[in-house]
Image (spheres, grey):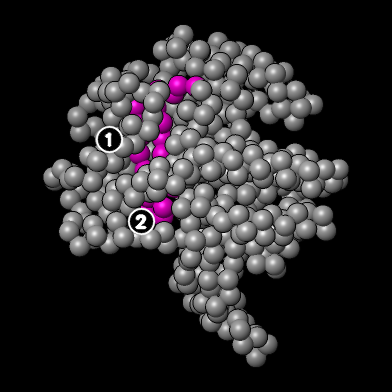
Amino acid sequence: MTTIDRSIVPDQLRASVAWLERDEAALAGVLSRVTNIVAEAGEGSWLIDVDGRRWLDLTCGIGVTNLGHGHPRVIAAAEAQLRTLVHTSVVTHHQRSIELAERLGAGCPFFADPQVFFCNSGAEAVEGAIKLSRQVTGRPGIVAFRGGFHGRTMGAVSLTTAKGKYRARYEPLLGGVTIAPWPRALRHGGDEALAVTEALRALDELLEVQSPAETVAAMVVEPVLGEGGYVPAPSAWLEGLRERCDRHGIVLVFDEVQTGIGRTGSLFAAERLGVRPDVVLFAKGVANGLPLGGLIAERSTMGRWPLATHGSTFGGNPVSCAAALAVLDVIADEGLCERATRLGDDVLTRLRSTLAGSPQVVDIRGLGLMIGVELSSAATADAVQDACLRNGVIVLTCGPGENVLRLIPALTISDADLDHGLTVVETGIKAS
């Protein structure tokens, strides 16, 4: 444990330092944290630490608190459920899971007759998708795409190539997984059409000579790369994946753990992008901070998953489901999908204008309120992140080179708070 000279710690930080010392002693060091903030409370788009300092949160716990911290309708729904029924596992059915499955299915207009399987997290949803696709097709192979992030469990990390550290020294990983190229326009001089053509050509070659199509159960793809750099997938490329999956009998899985629940401008990005997956994965924002995840697919697909060949002790627990129902109510009542689209377009327009010609900026991109600002280096991104933190604004970095600022504000963020946060980000970039 690091020894801290308490005599030089300012009075206004002493509570934080004391908690950080206890944290270092009690919690495993493998779990990294982005800041040394010790949060005590959350109010909307703001976090309050144990020393009473306020921080504008443009991270939402990595895209989880889409309605901000402590949304009153979500809290009320969870509290009410806590008083009646907390847990049943698979011993009984319960009402909230049925109601939520109906609502989530209705939010997938690309499915005619959807069914839902509930688990606890995005990684578990990915594991479930691997098992489902292998059961449905009778094939072993899984194709994922370079730069994707799908979780930290062994199956999920086998599909993850956002950063090498997620895989290092955990091999051998899951067998039968092949990684195909992602169409990054920046690597083709900004020519998206060429990037799509080249990525699909490489995929066809892979399906012919490396992972024969008749052995592939699923393709798993994020509609927007998350940890891999906040890169929206071109619709033409996703359409190409759809065509190849149809042609070869492969299950197309959209990992919408981060893009879903209104973040990109529709309940699921598949609807906005106009491409139909066979399976949609969700987690993160669905219960606004309570653990919940799952898979959605057509009944004809789910029906080929044999009874009791998969399960979850805590998945779809009544409290998380009640919170998620409230989340969906708020998104619908307050028009938050439409707001995410409008604010996302406004943020892109503003940043492209205010940062035009900045030598530190390589690219500004996004879909809805999932915005990435690619900078010239990791050092620049770190400097901007530090400058924002000094001014009370929390932002994250991502990308294989750790040089992309990712902006993930709450869908409920006020216009004034968003303006303030962007001003701090812009100032930090210009000064870096």
Determine the image quadrant of residue 122.
top left
Viewer-closest of 167 and 356 = 356
Which amino acid type is marked by label 2? Val
Q: Residue furthest bottom?
A: 7
- Regarding residue 311, the answer to whether it shows in the image is yes
Viewer-closest of 102 and 163 = 102
Task: Please give the name of the residue rendered at 44% of the width and 36% of the height, measured from the top-left corner.
Answer: 267
In the rendering, which numbered label is found on residue 74? 2
> Is residue 108 rendered magenta in the image?
no
Gap in angstroms between the C-alphas marked 2 and 1: 19 Å
Looking at marks 2 and 1 on the same chain, the residue that comes earlier in the sequence is marked by 2
SS for tag 2?
A: helix
Vertical placement of 396 versus 146: above or below? Answer: below
Q: Residue furthest left?
A: 92
Within 10 Å of disc 1 (Cα), the crowding (few <14, some 14-19, many 20+) is some
Vertical placement of 17 versus 246: above or below? Answer: below
Which amino acid type is marked by label 1? Glu
Task: Please give the name of the residue rendered at 23% of the width and 57% of the height, measured from the top-left corner.
Answer: 81
Vertical placement of 45 versus 120: above or below? Answer: below
Over which residues does the magenta segment extend? Answer: 275-297
Residue receiving disc 1: 102
Query: x, y (%) of residue 104?
Result: 34, 36
Query: x, y (%) of residue 89?
Result: 20, 48
Position of 400 with respect to 324 (left or right) is right
